[in-house]
Every structure is written in structure tokens, then in C-alpha cells.
Image (spheres, helix red, strand yellow):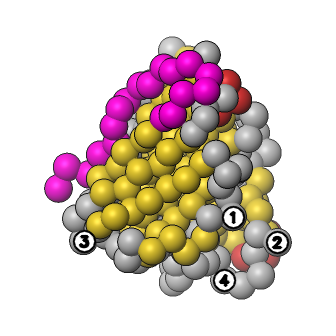
Amino acid sequence: AQSVTQPDIHITVSEGASLELRCNYSYGATPYLFWYVQSPGQGLQLLLKYFSGDTLVQGIKGFEAEFKRSQSSFNLRKPSVHWSDAAEYFCAVGGGFKTIFGAGTRLFVKA
Amino acid sequence: DAGVIQSPRHEVTEMGQEVTLRCKPISGHDYLFWYRQTMMRGLELLIYFNNNVPIDDSGMPEDRFSAKMPNASFSTLKIQPSEPRDSAVYFCASSFTGDQAFFGQGTRLTVV
């Protein structure tokens, strides 16, 4: 069965520090993978997606993610976090017309 | 394009009342999804449409929930009768390819 696991419910990082949010998936075929960000009171906004090709994908707002098939992972990274990055981040997997979302990781940024 | 538009943004209703949530997808998108987000269950897909036809409604929790898409630019999600456990944020999303979804800002429903 398809599933997405985000092991960290919340993470706190200092402004300017690097960030890595973990995502593991279970899928029977080559997955389509996504990272979304949700700010309070807002809908989900797509940060980046992986369909095929280069396993390191660049997204908006300085985020990137790396697809590692051997580890069934699609971790999100950012070299230097800004206070405005505080939000909830969702990893998602989909191979057709349904997308399954992880439970989300809430990011707190401290000054 | 203004993006996916949902109305109302907030809805407070009494238990037993009928609630109707509305969605206008992005023009040209032929997939429309309804999601429900709660703290306990996260983001759940309730139903999705392709070319105005419901394709999979297996996520609809009960018969109290129904969704329609009378045309390509409008969809509704109705709960009748509403119950306190229906309180959640309901998102509508649309997609051109069926894979990448564009989300509305959601409707926060509170049933008292």
C-alpha cells in the first residue's frame, strides 16, 4: 500500500541554520513525489516535485529535495532558514490521480 | 488566474444543520479534489472528479456527505445533517494533469 512517513512532528531551528526535513515513502512503482508548505490559515503551496530525471530537484524559496530510491526517501533541505519559513511542511506521493500526504512536520524558527 | 477559490472561508453552524461548501477550480483544470484536514487525521482525500464526473468517493466518511460538480467551474460539498465531529478545514484543489494539485485557502468549518 502507498504511504508517506514524516518522522518528525515538529522541528526547531535557529534562523540562518540549515534545515533537513525527512520523508520516507512506500510505493509499488516509481513515485511522483511532492513537498508542500502550509502557512497558518492558508492552503497548501507546492514547493517542488519529482517525476523523473535528476534526483536533486530545486524548488521555490531556496528549497531543494533529493530522491533516493535505495532509501525510499525524499528529504527536503534548505541551507539557511529564514523566520518566514516557519510553517507546516507536507511530503506527498502520488502515481496517478490521488496524492497521499504525510502527517506533516511543523517547523519553528528561533531568532 | 485567481487560483482555486473557496467560499466561505469560515462557517459556524449548529449541529443538525445543512452545510454547503463551494469551490471554483482554476480554469482549464479538469481534475477537482476535496480534502479534509484535522489534527487527528491529517489531510484526507474525500472525493475527486475528472471532467465533472465523480471518479472516487471512497474517502467520503458517511452518507451525510455529498459532493457535486454541475459544471467545469463549480463544485459543492454538502454535509446534511452536520455533526460536531465534522469540524475541520475543508480544502478544494484542482489539477490539470491529475498529479500536481493547486489548493484553495480552505473553509474552516465549526459545528457546535
- In three-dimensional space, the C-alpha distance between marks 2 and 1, rounded to whole angstroms, equals 16 Å
- In three-dimensional space, the C-alpha distance between marks 1 and 4, rounded to whole angstroms, equals 24 Å
Q: Are marks 4 and 2 on the same chain?
A: yes
A98 shown above or below B102: below
Is the Cβ of the residue at disc 1 closer than 8 Å to that at disc 3? no
Is the Cβ of the residue at disc 3 closer than 8 Å to that at disc 2? no
Which of the numbered marks, if any, corresponds to residue B58? 1
Q: Assess disc 1: are there few (<14), some (14-19) or many (≥20) residues with their C-alpha within 10 Å of its C-alpha.
A: few
Secondary element type, mark 2: loop
Q: Earlier in the sequence, mark 1 or mark 3?
A: 3
First to last magenta residue range: B1-19
Which of the numbered marks, if any, corresponds to residue A1? 2
Is the Cβ of the residue at disc 3 closer than 8 Å to that at disc 4? no
Secondary element type, mark 3: loop
| Horizontal arrangement in the rendering, residue A26 relative to residue B96 (left or right) | right
B80 shown above or below B48: above
Q: Position of residue A71 (x, y in %)?
A: 79, 69
Question: What residue is shown at x 71% (from left), y 49% (from top)?
Answer: B62
Q: Is residue B6 located in the magenta-colored stretch of the structure?
A: yes
Amino acid type shown at disc 4? Thr
- In three-dimensional space, the C-alpha distance between marks 4 and 2, rounded to whole angstroms, equals 14 Å
Chain letter belonging to callout 4: A
- Mark 3 or 4: in front is 3
Secondary element type, mark 4: loop
Q: Assess disc 3: are there few (<14), some (14-19) or many (≥20) residues with their C-alpha within 10 Å of its C-alpha.
A: few
| Horizontal arrangement in the rendering, residue B26 relative to residue B22 (left or right) | left
Question: What residue is shown at x 37% (from left), y 77% (from top)?
Answer: B51
A20 shown above or below B70: above
> Which residue is labeled 3 in the image?
B28
